[in-house]
Amino acid sequence: MFRASRDLGTAPSNVLILENLFGSPKTDRHVYERDDTGIHAEPLEGSCVLKSCNRIFYGLHRTLHANLAGPGLAELATRFTSNLKLELEANKSIGYEEWVEIEDLYSFIRDMIFRASTNALCGPHLLRLTPSFVADFWEFDSYSPKLFKDFPRWMIPKAYEVRDKLHKGMKKWHGFARDGYDWKLEDEGLWEEFFGAKVMRDRQMMFRAVEGMSDDAIAAVDLGMIWA
């Protein structure tokens, strides 16, 4: 089994996580279930014949592998450290001349790091368009164990409500970025303001080409990207 690990896939567990935790609509499940071609450029032997645009697992693997290594990763790391420096400098509660008391040091550091990393990954407009996104995200994260277990909405209504808010924010950003980005450009480098890092722009182009994939499903999978 381990010698054949290159031919094994995680599609069923991926679909379970996308639906239970990140709220991908079950009506979009066919987008994933029809793809048994694997993550490599050459489809697995005996797999179904799909259009290249519908090979979603290969597309996800390719965009991550191409953009989160080498120059792409270096650019993302540089953006993150620069953003974190700006977060620290802009925070009025930090004292430079004397000691200060911070009620919750963990949340203080966590939120600054999240803003810095999210702006590096997605550009500045996601958090600008949805100011409550940071607080909503961590509330959603606190419910993740129950969402993983697929508790129904009536048992954990707050968890579903905050996830719905995050979906709304993701779709608002997606719409704004798609309208603002100049799609006629062949390549705008490793980072631009609308989608942020090139990996997010490439993912968006890939998702929009997948037949039958809804905006709700795209919001869910990109929420998963931020959470991961």
Image (cartoon, helix red, strand yellow):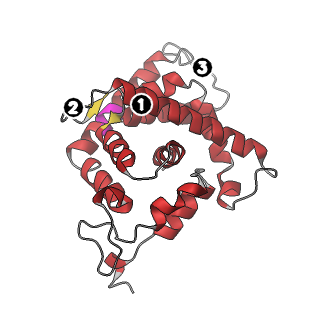
> Which region shows up in magenta?
76-80
Q: Earlier in the sequence, mark 3 or mark 1?
A: 3
Q: Name which residue type carries label 3.
A: Val
Provide residue 169's location: percent of width, then percent of height.
Answer: 55, 32
Can you tell which mark lies on residue 119? Answer: 1
Q: Earlier in the sequence, mark 2 or mark 1?
A: 1
Residue 182 located left or right of residue 28: left
Provide residue 30's location: percent of width, then percent of height.
Answer: 50, 62
Residue at horizontal 64%, vertical 43%?
A: 140
Provide residue 141's location: percent of width, then percent of height.
Answer: 62, 46
Tell me whether the residue at label 3 lies in contact with that at label 1, contact meaning CB atoms closer than 8 angstroms.
no
Q: Is residue 2 above or below residue 92?
A: below
Magenta region includes residue 77: yes
Q: Nearer the viewer's eye, disc 3 or disc 2?
A: 2
Instruction: State the residue in front, 213 or 72.
Output: 213
Local packing at callout 3 (Cα closer than 10 Å; few below 14, some 14-19, many 20+) is few
Q: Earlier in the sequence, mark 3 or mark 2?
A: 3
Residue reaching furthest right? 155
Local packing at callout 2 (Cα closer than 10 Å; few below 14, some 14-19, many 20+) is few
Residue at horizontal 64%, vertical 23%?
A: 101
Q: Quadrant of the N terminus?
A: bottom left
Q: Name which residue type carries label 2.
A: Glu
Residue 165 can be seen in this image: yes
For the image, the number of numbered tags is 3
Residue at horizontal 81%, vertical 52%?
A: 155
Mark 2 sits on what residue? Answer: 188
Mark 3 sits on what residue? Answer: 100
Provide residue 14's location: percent of width, then percent of height.
Answer: 50, 63
Magenta region includes residue 62: no
